[in-house]
Amino acid sequence: MSPGRHPRWPSLVLVAGYLASDLFLSGIGAALFVAGLGAAVFLALLAFARVPAASLLVEGVVLGAVGYAGELTGKPGAGFAFLELTAAAVFLVSAAAGRPYLQGQVRSLTGSALHPGLAARMTLVMGGVFLVHGAFLTVMMFTSGIGTVPAAVAFAALYLAALLLLRRKGLRDAAASLPLLVASGDSGFILRQGDAVLGSIGLCGDRIAEVTVRSLSGDTSPERFLKSLEEALARGGTRTVRIESWPGDTGPLEVSGYGRTDGCWQRILPALR
């Protein structure tokens, strides 16, 4: 583990300490307890794991300050509202800076990283959830007072909406990345994948597709072209591909599983999963 990086449990201990201090302590005493807990966990991690996680000191001070600010309002539940607004700021600022907060959290928990685009999107959406819910709690705090049931229902609704939004965006991105055959002006088809043009073909037939490969774009490997072509045809119901004309060396056809049959290169496509 690199210097300054630490597992998630110390931060969870700090959050638990913050919640406990909000319930059982008050004022500057609660703030000092959380800040001191951050220092204690920092020293324990340094002594037993040799990890100088200075961020724990910052987390302890920030959580203590947030709790103290809530105390100064004199309103019950203010600490929770301010905690969510602080979390929103961390999420949104980290995403804007190109270092999404959830990227590091997922890496610490699983050992593998999210795709940068997905990590940024998740961080932005969850930052929005904390921002809206924190603002909602703040309005409740200064009007009718924070109610546990409406606060929980509002958070559940926002979280569900966030999941649906992320899923819909993920499906749109997945669909946009699929290879696609687009009719061209010369009675042929252009093979595209996202914004990239992979090549052009002539096509006849449906379940058995007779293909004339006219050209491959300069930066597209034959293997990628064939894989994308097969996927685009299979999604249209094709079960067998017969390539009647292929530009250049036919070695990639053999490597990709095509056999010479009746003067063309043929392959039966596996069923789509």
Image (tube, grey):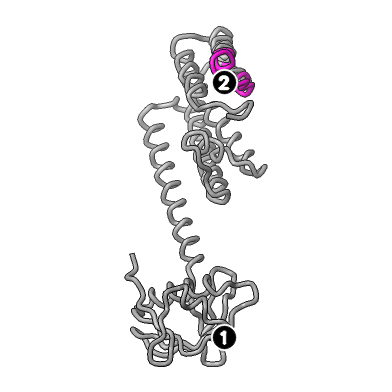
Q: Is residue 19 above or below residue 148?
A: above
Q: Is residue 22 above or below residue 179?
A: above
**Which labelled disc corresponds to residue 63?**
2
Q: Which residues, given as a range, are shown in magenta?
A: 42-57
Image depth: mark 2 or mark 1 in front: 1
In the depicted view, which residue is nearer to us: 12 or 24?
Answer: 12
Q: Residue 113 placed where, x, y %?
A: 53, 43
Q: Is residue 54 magenta?
A: yes
Q: Residue 19 placed where, x, y %?
A: 46, 18
Q: Is residue 238 magenta?
A: no
Q: Which quadrant holds the N terminus?
A: top right
How many numbered marks does the figure carry?
A: 2
In the depicted view, which residue is nearer to us: 191 or 99?
Answer: 191
Tell me the amino acid under the disc marked 2: Leu
**Which labelled disc corresponds to residue 61?**
none
Q: Residue 251 placed where, x, y %?
A: 52, 78
Residue at horizontal 60 percent and vertical 34 percent from the top:
90
**Label whose residue precedes the other's in the sequence (2 or 1):** 2
Question: What residue sits right under mark 1 in the picture?
Answer: 247
Tell me the amino acid under the disc marked 1: Pro
Q: Residues within 10 Å of mark 1 (few under 14, many from 20)?
A: few
In the depicted view, which residue is nearer to us: 180 or 44?
Answer: 44
**Residue 271 in sight:** yes
Asked which secondary structure carries label 1, the reply is loop
**Residue 71 in sight:** no
Q: Is residue 110 above or below residue 115?
A: above
Quarter-of-image position of residue 124: top right
Residues under labels 2 and 1: Cα distance? 65 Å
In the depicted view, which residue is nearer to us: 163 or 170?
Answer: 170
Asked which secondary structure carries label 2, the reply is helix
Residue at horizontal 53 percent and vertical 34 percent from the top:
135
